[in-house]
Image (cartoon, grey):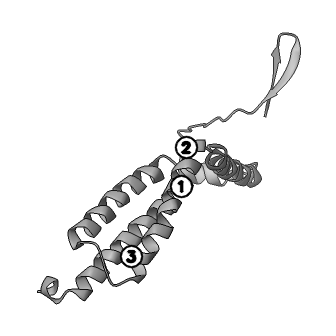
Amino acid sequence: MVDALVSGTSVRKDVEVQVLSSAPKEIQLFQPNHDFGRCFDFIRIKFKSSWNAIINKYMWQDTVIAVCQLAFFPSMLPTLLGKDKPALSTSVLNALIVAVITTCFFTLHLWFSFATGTLTALIWAILAFQKWSLNPSLKS
């Protein structure tokens, strides 16, 4: 924490400072006045700020995409449990495309969309496996 005088009023600001020293590591680690608590505070603050960045980066688009993906689950349930399955190429291609899109959701930190996309890709992969295992001509 650093106190600064701004426009006649005292303002307290968080300042992250990285000090690079040319001293050998042995000297840096075993200094008699070294405050190990500050090191742990730095780690705790960094972890907390990273977690807050994930939580506070909520986007309404994440919820909309996730709800739309969830809407497909009831329609896919009869296909998953029934005897008729889509073509193997359709199931494999859909599983791959949804997996690629889901990877994009992960990189954009759209966590709900990532979760529902993973389930959707898994359902398509299960359908592909079911079609492959039910059709003996596809096994050879």
Query: Would you place residue 67 above or below residue 85 in this image?
Result: above
Give the x, y percent position of residue 105. Answer: 46, 51
| Numbered disc 1: secondary structure | helix
Q: CA distance from mark 3 to mark 2?
A: 28 Å
Residue 60 percent across, percent down from the top left: 60, 43
Extreme residue toward the top, this view: 7
Looking at this view, is 89 or 110 the one in front? 89
The quarter of the rendered structure image containing the N terminus is top right
Q: Earlier in the sequence, mark 3 or mark 1?
A: 1
Looking at the image, is mark 2 or mark 1 earlier in the sequence? Answer: 2
Mark 3 lies on a secondary structure that is helix
Q: Please, what is the three-letter code of the amino acid marked with disc 2? A: Gln
Crowd around label 3: few <14 · some 14–19 · many ≥20 (10 Å): some
Q: Mark 3 or 2, which is nearer the eye?
A: 3
x and y percentages locating residue 3 in the rendered image? 82, 26
- Vertical relation: 96 (above or below) 139: above
**Point 34% across, 73% down: residue:** 125
| Frontmost residue, 136 versus 28 | 136
Q: Are marks 3 and 1 in contact (CB under 8 Å)?
A: no
Query: Which residue carries the number 3 mark?
Result: 79
- Marks 2,1: beta carbons within 8 A: no
* Callout 2 secondary element: helix
Q: Nearer the viewer, residue 8 or 131?
A: 131
Q: Position of residue 44 (x, y in %)?
A: 71, 53
In the picture of the structure, the residue carrying the numbered disc 2 is 61
Q: Which residue is mark 1?
A: 66
Q: Pick whichever of labels 3 and 2 is earlier in the sequence.
A: 2
Q: Residue at x 41, y 50 (%)?
A: 104
Q: Alpha-carbon neighbours of circle 1 within 10 Å: few (<14), some, or many (≥20)?
A: some
Foreground mark, 3 or 1?
A: 3
Q: With 38 as the anchor, is 17 left or right in this view?
A: left
